[in-house]
Image: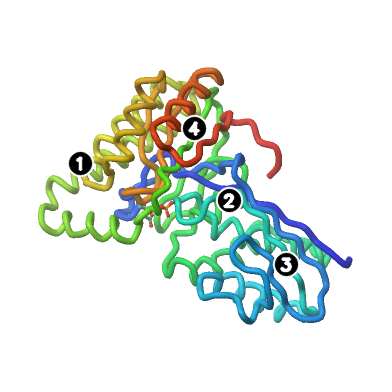
Amino acid sequence: KSSGEGNANGKIILMGEHSVVYGKPAIAFPFQPTHVTAEITDHIYDVLRSGYFVGPLAKAPKSLENIKTLIHQLRHDFSTPPVQITISSTIPAERGMGSSAAVAVAITRAFFDWQNLPLSHELLLTYVNYAEKISHGNPSGIDAAATAGDEPILFQKSAAFETFPINISGFLIVADTGVKGKTRQTVKAVAQRFEQDNKTTGHLINELGDLTLKAKKAILNNQAAYLGELMNAAQKNLAALQVSDQTLDNLIMVANQNGALGAKLTGGGKGGCMIALASDYSTAKKITTALTNQGAKATWIQELGVYQYA
Ligand code: PMV
């Protein structure tokens, strides 16, 4: 084949950010309104065409080191000629939506499509986590699994991933604060709080873990209103851990005032994105309009359980 194509979704963490660092479970969703496509064609030398950089792969900036290394590894493992890779992405970078993992998923899929080789889910995750190690140092693997799949994931450190079906009707809203997420910084701040006062901090973390497990049951039992309450409860604990901020608090308040069943930050916090749950599409639209009026830089809506492609 002279060309190949691959896709991947964005992702959001529904419940369990920060507490997942302490061994508690987290739930992540593939988020299809944001996605990335990679196209690979033969070329005389390795070339990258993306929103951030167009030119020889060898000259790509440090921030694209993950892509560079992944391509070199794939080309080495399969002894292929040079390639031109074209990446089109609607996933905002550095907002906790899994853009780096999604790009790696799309490239790996495009490469195997180009080579006309079968690609198992396991092998896909191996290549993606290899690239993610370069982007994030010590990735949990949750981004790779969520962006490569089409089902929610229950993730717990040192345990195998568990996927489960979405059996809940509702609409998930995501809004971008327009501010880069500060995952490294907030994870460190929570660790310091834990050292200073492990009783209070530990209690908040344990509760976040319990809320995540209850959320999984709510999803399996089609209890959207209850899931909304659990999201609100999680946000209270995340705010108590001081990983929220005024911009996030304000957007969360506006979502709730406009009919959300619940709302919370998603990912590392202090910037990045917030999420909200609505029972129907017209309420979801009303919420996104209100969020945009309050300064959200971008908003998306996804009907839960309705997926276009894996
Ligand atoms: O901001 P994101 O989507 O990379 O999520 C960070 C999630 C944390 O629990 C805060 C950190 C982690 O490594 O799990």
Which residue is under mark 4?
A: 173
Determine whether label 4 and label 2 are within 8 Å by CB: no
Which residue is under mark 2?
A: 147
What is the three-letter code of the residue carrying label 4? Ile
Residue at position x 51%, y 66% in the image: 132
Closer to the chain start, of discs 1 and 2, is 2
Please, what secondary structure does the residue beneath circle 4 have?
strand
Q: CA distance from mark 1 to mark 2?
A: 29 Å
Residue at position x 71%, y 42% in the image: 309
What is the three-letter code of the residue carrying label 3? Ile
Dot 4: within a 10 Å radius of its alpha carbon, few (fewer than 14), some, or many (20 or more) residues?
Answer: many
Residue at position x 66%, y 36% in the image: 307
Residue at position x 55%, y 53% in the image: 145
Q: Tell me, for residue 240, which label it has, or none.
A: 1
Residue 209's x, y, as percent? 32, 42
Q: CA distance from mark 3 to mark 1?
A: 44 Å
Q: Nearer the viewer, mark 3 or mark 2?
A: 3
Dot 3: within a 10 Å radius of its alpha carbon, few (fewer than 14), some, or many (20 or more) residues?
Answer: many
Closer to the chain start, of discs 3 and 1, is 3
* Corner quadrant of residue 255: top left
Q: CA distance from mark 4 to mark 1?
A: 23 Å
If the image is split into quadrants, where does the N terminus sit? bottom right
- Depth order, front residue of 191/164: 191
Closer to the chain start, of discs 3 and 2, is 3
Determine whether label 4 and label 3 are within 8 Å by CB: no
Q: Does 264 sit left or right of 307 as displayed?
A: left
* Corner quadrant of residue 122: bottom right
**Is 73 situated above or below 212?**
below
Please, what secondary structure does the residue beneath circle 1 have?
helix
